[in-house]
Each structure stands twice: as structure tokens, then as C-alpha cells.
Amino acid sequence: MERLGIDIGGTFTKFYDGKKKWKVKTPRSLKELIELIKREGKGKRISLAVAGLIDQREKTVKQSPNLPFIEGARLEELIGREIVIVNDATAACYGEYRLGAARGSSTCVCLTLGTGLGGGAVIGGAPLMGATGCSMEVGHITVEPRGWRCHCGREGCLESYVSSYGLERLYLIEGDKCLPSYKVIELIKKREEKALIVFKKFTEYLALGVINLVHIFNPDTVVLCGGIVKEIPEISRLVEKEVKEKALKLPGSCVKVKRGELEEFSGAIGAYLLTEKVK
Ligand SMILES: [Zn+2]
């Protein structure tokens, strides 16, 4: 049977069928989204990657800030057949493990930097799902007690510093100006003084998150994905340097921090590959 990986993002829904990649605007209602999945996935085995808290037992997305209409929907019933459903960053990590920057890794973790901060892990060739499918919510590990308010409602989450809105907030404090994240990235690339201070803080927080993961998982590879990593490639080298300096010596010395290779289709590619892996 033919297979199709579908990565449902807040703005675009991306597809990969083993040969072709394509994307369309994500529909704004559940009815339209289900119609799109049924149309594109006709006669194929489907796997969905979605940003949000997944409940594997019910095959539902419990919480998804960018796709509120999908929350709690009985997707298998609506689509009318068995599907695989995973968190988008877990799918991206599996894609990078099989076909990208983490090929050959025994233990890898992946961080996806975007509007939010996602995470995934592949250990011994298997994606880490957790008890319900909510493993690796790296964006919500606490890095500052009583720190900035995160979109999840908690305080001091890594995501409230290391994400597009974190970057904007860091610049607002340092540069006293409210700029969209792409403008801050432009200023970092132009080596503007305040933007460089912001970038240093951003990288330190990111490295702190990576060091925590290094101490838990002892990975051989950490993959960083997302627009900002693509725009500022030196970020992986800087994070690796911090990790080598500040993590425990043995786990710190054997880890490589790499940029993702599959770019915006990593989630769709991982989802496609997971159709063979997860029942
Ligand atoms: Zn949070």
C-alpha cells in the first residue's frame, strides 16, 4: 500500500509520499482539514505529525495552540480508518535520524526552533513516545524559576526565551524596541551591537536546554532545526562549544550538535517513515 506523511502546521500542511514533497495552506476548520487529508491520502496508509500534546491511546491531539480546532477530535473516526499520529518534533527527529543529520546515531535528540520550541528523541532506532505520546516537551522545561510567562501559562519555560517570541522579547528588553523575529535575525546577521547581545543570551538559554538533555540522554547527536538555525548557521557550533565547556565531561565530550538537513519537510518525511514503525 502506498504511504503518505502529513505534517499539519499552523500555517502550512506538508506532504511526503516517498518521492514528492508538497505543501498547501492549512485549512482553518476541522471539516476542511479532514477533507484535505481524505483527498490527498486516498488509498494510502497515512501518518499525521501535529504540533501539540498527542494522546496515542485515543489518537487525538489534546492541546494545540496553533490548531485549536483539532483539539480532542477523534481523527481515526473522522478519517474513517487506522492512522498513525505523532508529535511534529518527534516526527522531525525520526526523519533526521533515518535520512538526515543524525544518520547512524544510537541516541539522538532534536530541537525544533520556530514559533514555539519542540523536541524529539530517537533511542536505539525507536522514536521516544512516552506513556501517551507527550515525551520531549523540551520547550516547557523550566530554565528560570519565576521567569517569563510562556504561552503554556507556566513561568520560565525554555520556549519563552528560545523561540521566535522569545527572541522578540529578548530584543525588546535589550534594544528597547518591539521588532518581529525576522527583523531581529536580520540585525544579528548585520552584527548590530544590541542584536548580538540578544543572540548571545538566546544561545546561552538554548545551550542550557541542550546541556539538560545531554545529562538525561547522553546523546551522540543533537540536531537543531528551524528557520533561525538556517538563517544563522553558526548557532550549532556555538551551542556545541557551550555544551563542551559546561556539561559533564564524558557526556559533553561525545556529543555533536548539528543543523537539521531535511529543513521544512523533516516532519512530513519522519511521519512518512513512521507509517512502517508505529502501529
Ligand atoms: Zn511553557
Image (cartoon, rainbow, N blue to C red):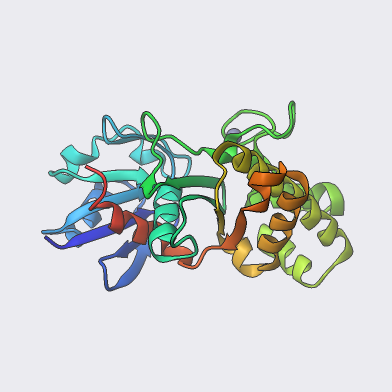
Q: Is residue 202 above or below residue 64?
A: below
Q: Horizontal and vertical percent for residue 66?
A: 46, 45
Determine the image quadrant of residue 240: bottom right
Q: Residue at x 49, y 68 (%)?
A: 261
Number of numbered tags placed on the structure image? 0
Q: Horizontal and vertical percent for residue 173?
A: 83, 46
The N terminus sits in image quarter: bottom left
Left or right for 245, reference 47: right
Q: Horizontal and vertical percent for residue 88?
A: 41, 49
Q: Residue at x 59, y 62 (%)?
A: 258
The C terminus sits in image quarter: top left
Q: Is residue 30 above or below residue 183?
A: above
Q: Residue at x 67, y 52 (%)?
A: 253
Q: Horizontal and vertical percent for residue 116?
A: 56, 47
Hey, which residue is sitting farthest front in the picture?
Answer: 250
* Towards the viewer: 109 or 256: 256
* Towards the viewer: 91 or 163: 91
* Towards the viewer: 140 or 11: 140
Left or right for 276, reference 9: left
Residue 12 visible in this rendered orientation of the protein: no
